[in-house]
C-alpha cells in the first residue's frame, strides 16, 4: 500500500515507461501489478490511522536500541516531505525497518539513542 492511494505496488519501471502518476511514498515512479486498486489519499490515511495495516515496512536514517526511529529529516538538507511515516509508526502496526546499518561515511545507524529528530518513540519491532 502506498500512502498516496495505491494498493498493489510493483517494481520500478523501465526507462521510458515511467508514469508520473504512479509513485511510491519516496516519490519514485513505480508500476502496478495485476489486481492493483486505486483510492484517494484520505482513504489511504483512514486505513493507516484506523489501524487496518498489520505491518509497516519502511526505511530509516537512525534506529535506537529502545526502538526509537528517525527517518524524515537531516538538519540542513532539503526534505521532500514528511509523508505518512509518523502516522504509520503511530498506528499500532508491527514496524519493520529496512536500512543499511552504516551511513555512507561508515558511521553506525543503529545507535544507543537517535541524534536526528524522531519519527516515532519506541516503535520499531525489527531491523
Image (cartoon, rainbow, N blue to C red):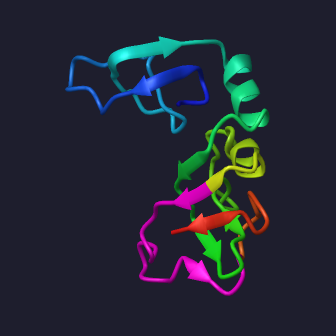
Above or below residue 64? Residue 118 is above
Above or below residue 98? Residue 16 is above
x, y percentage for residue 66?
71, 79
Q: Is residue 19 visible?
A: no
Part of the protein shown in magenta: 95-114
Above or below residue 87? Residue 115 is below
Residue found at the far bottom of this picture: 112
x, y percentage for residue 87?
75, 42
| Residue closer to the observer: 25 or 107 | 25
Tell me: 12 left or right of 15: right
| Residue closer to the observer: 29 or 90 | 90
Tell me: 120 left or right of 61: right
Q: Please say whether residue 100 is one of the residues in the magenta stretch.
A: yes
Q: Quadrant of the rendered structure where residue 124 is?
A: bottom right
Q: Residue drawn 74% across and 38% down?
A: 51
Q: Residue drawn 64% across and 38% down?
A: 53
Q: Residue drawn 53% across and 12% down?
A: 38
Q: Residue drawn 24% across and 17% down?
A: 17
x, y percentage for residue 52?
69, 34
Q: Quadrant of the rendered structure where residue 45 is?
A: top right
Q: Please say whether residue 60 is one of the residues in the magenta stretch.
A: no
| Secondary structure mostly taken by the magenta-highlighted segment of the chain | loop
Q: Is residue 7 visible?
A: yes
Q: Quadrant of the rendered structure where residue 29 is?
A: top left
Tell me: 88 left or right of 33: right
Q: How many marks?
A: 0
Amino acid at each position: 500500500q502506498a500512502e498516496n492511494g495505491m494498493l498493489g505496488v510493483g517494481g520500478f519501471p523501465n526507462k521510458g515507461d515511467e508514469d508520473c502518476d504512479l509513485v511510491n511514498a519516496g516519490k519514485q515512479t513505480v508500476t502496478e501489478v495485476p489486481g492493483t486498486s486505486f483510492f484517494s489519499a484520505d482513504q489511504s490515511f483512514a486505513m493507516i490511522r484506523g489501524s487496518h495495516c498489520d505491518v509497516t515496512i519502511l526505511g530509516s536514517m537512525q534506529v535506537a536500541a529502545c526502538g526509537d526511529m528517525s527517518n524524515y529529516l537531516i538538519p540542513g538538507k532539503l526534505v521532500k516531505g514528511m509523508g505518512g511515516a509518523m502516522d504509520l509508526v503511530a498506528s499500532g502496526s508491527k514496524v519493520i525497518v529496512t536500512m543499511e546499518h552504516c551511513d555512507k561515511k561508515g558511521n553506525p545507524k543503529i545507535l544507543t539513542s537517535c541524534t536526528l529528530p524522531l519519527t516515532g518513540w519506541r516503535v520499531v519491532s525489527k531491523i
